[in-house]
């Protein structure tokens, strides 16, 4: 099995592309879904978050007020670093545990959505291929303002906190332009799916794992045999 990293910018359409992979029967890991679970009330991350940021970032039911938290951390780089230190290691660990589970259930590859894949660099070594989702600058700004109910000034500030899209594109194996219709985005995504399905890397990887396991098995058998014969 190999891992395909899916990244992009804020509001470029990563979730849309991820849903197309899911519809085509591909196992996916959504970083946003994982983050929500990591910060569920009562978890260690939630407790650390409450201790550092206070009740201000919590809703009446105890869940994290993501909009308010975003307002705080995007205006303060130290607080943003603190949030990342609380959440990122736990999110990454949870995602890798999910990936291991998919490996043992026979998936040839999975798609892992990691918005800050290049910015953090923590998971780059695990990615066999990387896909970046882009759209026109004005579309990204409009979508982010509408989706998160932000002013244009605030939306621009948040976009500028991430690596420029052109830099991400230069580091990627595939690019999906989500500037057009859903049909166009689907056509691009399904074209990549066809290429990934033809990849022989998964069989190469499985062969290596198989050989390693057989070596361990026969090695242990040889040791046990020697011990028995010595008796």
Image: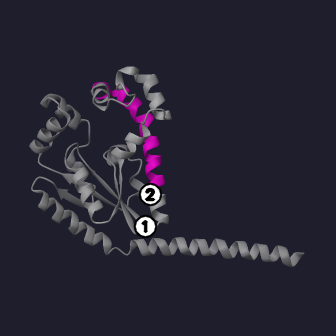
Q: Residue at x 47, y 47 (%)?
A: 93
Assign a secondary structure to mark 1. Answer: loop
Dominant secondary structure, magenta:
helix
Question: Position of 5 compared to 167: left or right?
Answer: right
Please state the horizontal and vertical placement of residue 173, each as a whole percent of the image: 27, 61
**Colouring style:** one colour
Q: Residue at x 66, y 73 (%)?
A: 217
Residues marked 1 and 2 touching at CB (< 8 Å): yes
Where's the N terminus, which quadrant? bottom left
Question: Position of 60 compared to 226: left or right?
Answer: left
* Rendered position, 21 above or below 227: above
Please state the horizontal and vertical placement of residue 50, each as a whole percent of the image: 43, 25
Q: Residue 99 carries which label?
A: 2
> Is residue 6 on the magenta stretch?
no
The residue indicated by pointer 1 is: 1
Quarter of the rendering containing residue 73: top left
Question: Position of 147 compared to 18: left or right?
Answer: left
Q: Classify mark 1: residues with Cα within 10 Å, few (<14), some (14-19) or many (20+).
A: many
* Rendered position, 68 above or below 196: above
Q: Which of marks 1 and 2 is nearer the N terminus?
A: 1
Question: Position of 187 compared to 109: left or right?
Answer: left
Q: Classify mark 2: residues with Cα within 10 Å, few (<14), some (14-19) or many (20+).
A: many
* Rendered position, 94 above or below 72: below
Task: Name the residue nearer the viewer: 55 or 134.
Answer: 55
Task: Name the residue nearer the viewer: 70 or 24.
Answer: 24
* Disc 1/disc 2 C-alpha distance (Å): 9 Å
Where's the C terminus, which quadrant? bottom right
Quarter of the rendering containing residue 170: bottom left
Q: Which residue lies furthest to the right in this view?
A: 231
Q: Which mark is residue 215?
A: none
Q: Which residue is drawn at 88% across and 76% down?
A: 230
Give the magenta part as a residue range. 73-98
């Amino acid at each position: 099995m190999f891992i395909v990293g899916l990244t992009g910018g804020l509001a470029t359409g990563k979730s849309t592309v991820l849903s197309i992979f899911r519809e085509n029967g591909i196992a996916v890991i959504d970083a946003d879904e994982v983050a929500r679970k990591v910060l569920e009330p009562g978890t260690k991350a939630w407790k650390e978050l409450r201790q550092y940021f206070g009740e201000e970032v919590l809703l009446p039911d105890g869940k994290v007020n993501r909009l308010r938290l975003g307002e705080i951390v995007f205006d303060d780089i130290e607080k943003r670093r603190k949030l990342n230190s609380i959440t990122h290691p736990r999110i990454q660990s949870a995602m890798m545990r999910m990936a291991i589970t998919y490996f043992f259930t026979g998936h040839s590859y999975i798609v892992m959505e990691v918005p800050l894949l290049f910015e953090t660099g923590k998971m780059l070594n695990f990615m066999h291929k990387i896909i970046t989702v882009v759209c026109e600058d004005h579309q990204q700004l409009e979508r982010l303002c509408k989706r998160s109910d932000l002013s244009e000034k605030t939306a621009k500030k948040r976009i500028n906190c991430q690596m420029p899209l052109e830099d991400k594109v230069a580091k990627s194996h595939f690019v999906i332009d989500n500037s057009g219709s859903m049909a166009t985005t689907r056509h691009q995504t399904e074209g990549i799916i066809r290429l990934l399905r033809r990849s022989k890397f998964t069989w190469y990887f499985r062969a290596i794992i198989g050989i390693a396991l057989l070596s361990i098995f026969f090695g242990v058998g040889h040791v046990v045999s020697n011990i028995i014969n010595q008796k």
